[in-house]
Amino acid sequence: MISKERIEEILKETNVLQEGHFLLTSGKHSNKYMQCARILEHPNYTVELCSILANAYKDDNVDIVIGPATGGILFAYEIARQLGVRNLFAERENGKMTLRRGFKVPKGARVLVAEDVITTGGSVKEVIDIVKSQGGQVIGVAVLVDRSNGKIDFGCKLESVYSTEVLSYDPTECPICKDGNLPLVKPGSRVTVNN
């Protein structure tokens, strides 16, 4: 079993867990940002962290692992590879999550939904709805990072490699802005924002 300290060390080393002063998509500010795609630059760490999730579901008779595009595709694939089962992915078409490319969930299949990061769980919930609409049974959700700190209820088992609550602040109340020592950065672009 990998310790939480080792997991944090990996997440910091690979720039998944970033600390500073960030402008979130919601418009709020935060002192932390999770860029989960960065772990994929390091296949050895991806395999190591996905093994935690595969081991959590090894006794659940999983038939299929499915992930939403794009963040969940490679995580779902690696977990499926380690479990020795089929892998599918869902993607958006006209704004709606759907199965394309001939993918189907057989009736009664035991399905694990995998994602890179959850905050509200919206994409995962959409994939769960797809699985159920095709007659599959969702036996669990596996995520690399749970930014809700376990607060989301998917109606099934939820396992995460790293669970934390990322605090966010209204821009007018942001203590980092008030301190004035760190520039505001929009994640993904590394662009300093004038505030």
Image: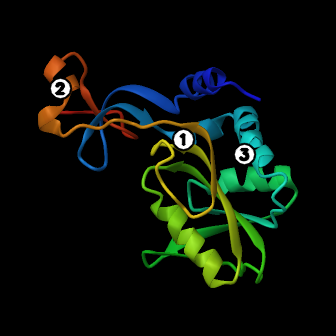
Relative placement, left or right, of 28 versus 163 is: left
Say which label, 3 or 1, has the lower sequence index. Answer: 1
* Applied colour scheme: rainbow
Residue for badge 2: 177
- What residue occupies the far right of the structure in this picture? 84
Give the percent coordinates (x, y) of residue 11. Answer: 57, 29
Disc 3 to disc 2: CB gap under 8 Å: no
- Judge depth for marks 3 and 1 and give the one in front: 3
Q: Earlier in the sequence, mark 3 or mark 2?
A: 3
Depicted 187 relative to depicted 57: above or below: above
Q: Secondary structure at mark 1?
A: helix
The mark lying in front, picked from 3 and 2, is: 3
Residue 162 spot, x, y in % from top left? 58, 36
Mark 3 — residue?
A: 53
Q: Is residue 158 visible?
A: yes
Q: Mark 1 sits on what residue?
A: 36
Judge whether 145 appears above or below 70 on screen. above
